[in-house]
Amino acid sequence: MQKLKVGMIGCGKISSIYFQNCKAYPVLEVAACADLNVARARASAEEHGVPKACSVSELLADAEIDIVINLTIPAAHAEVCLQALDAGKHVYVEKPLAVTREEGQAILAKAKEKCRLIGSAPDTFLGGGIQTCIKLLDDGWIGTPVAASAFMIGRGHEHWHPDPEFYYAKGGGPMFDMGPYYLTALVAMLGPIRRVTGSTRISYPERTITSQPKFGQTVKVETPTHVAGVMDFHSGVIGTITTSFDAFGGAQVPRIEIYGSQGTLSVPDPNTFGGPIRIKRHDHRDWSEIPLMHGYTENSRGLGVLDMAYAVINGRANRAGGELAYHVLEAMHGFHDAADEGKHYIMQSRCERPVPMPLGPVHGILD
């Protein structure tokens, strides 16, 4: 079996699950890792049995590396993606694709120029949970979808995260932090978005950190912490989404529901790969839980890299592709723009609905 060599840039907390999963896929070989802190890269290499730890420039100069996994902070996503593409690598980046639309457009243009694939998290929609929902929708279990709702409502990160400041700075907030999971799942199930509108607010101009080691310090809030949006999909479905860091008492709402002419589908948490999935058809009194029909139901972060590898080998599009990631990025900005300007934002991008995952493949083998 052909193997593609992978180099990982950014050895922070999220990297561990990528090391673990990518090493288990037969088509991938994790050959190198890099970090601005080379000592941290060496520690990760030793922990995960990676043969080479080096600087970022050394990894990019390595002609044997086929795919770069970019796990840097969001502010560095575009710079590292562009450097890796210039070096002739295919690139898979953690969410979001970039911070600004202009950066996202530059990444897509560079990938096209270099004839390389760009992919982006989240890849949770490739897991058994959302993929089973896609099959249920495609097989007509709830008839014709007419509407959808999505909720990500919590109290923010200052009560548990050791460095929560970023989440309240420009480019942060609940939509840019968690919106990619929800919007990617919705587009994967319902297709691309035509226009959006929204309302936003900063409910609390200052936050007090109650986690360690910065207990008692305050954070000035510079970005909306409650975002309510409306989406018109090209399919005709009307969707609503609420993302909030302002619910200090918590919330009792579904993650995602899709409402159809013959029933309602309750979709699992799009930040996970599994279930549960529940459905209530028009001719049934009670809700029923639906067994998962697809694999990859555990924490499978890196599944998008596996799919990219098969796309490279077989000359097809990758499912967690750059166009999908950019479409989601544009929508997130669109909610904020619409709120600021008091009008609908017309989406300029349009992506293809990703091809559903195959049923019942051997773990690690897609095509």
Image (spheres, rainbow, N blue to C red):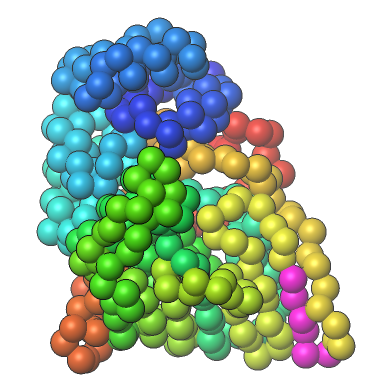
From where the camera sits, is residue 316 visible?
Answer: no
Residue 287 pos. (x, y %):
81, 78
Residue 269 pos. (x, y %):
59, 61
> From what the image shows, is residue 133 above or below residue 337?
above
Q: Residue at x 38, y 65 (%)?
A: 174
Residue 282 inside the magenta-drawn segment? yes
Q: Quadrant of residue 361?
A: top right
Q: Quadrant of the C terminus?
A: top right
Is 278 situated left or right of 206 in this image? Answer: right
Judging depth in this view, the residue of 295 and 11 nearest the camera is: 11
Judging depth in this view, the residue of 230 and 292 nearest the camera is: 230
Is 333 situated left or right of 176 in this image? Answer: left
Q: Quadrant of residue 159?
A: bottom left
Residue 69 pos. (x, y %):
35, 33
Is 210 situated left or right of 38 in this image? Answer: right
Q: Which residues are magenta?
A: 278-283
Q: Residue at x 74, y 56 (%)?
A: 292
**Would you say the magenta stretch is mainly helix, strand or loop?**
strand
Give the residue furthest to the front. Answer: 216
Residue 176 inside the magenta-drawn segment? no
Residue 364 pos. (x, y %):
60, 31
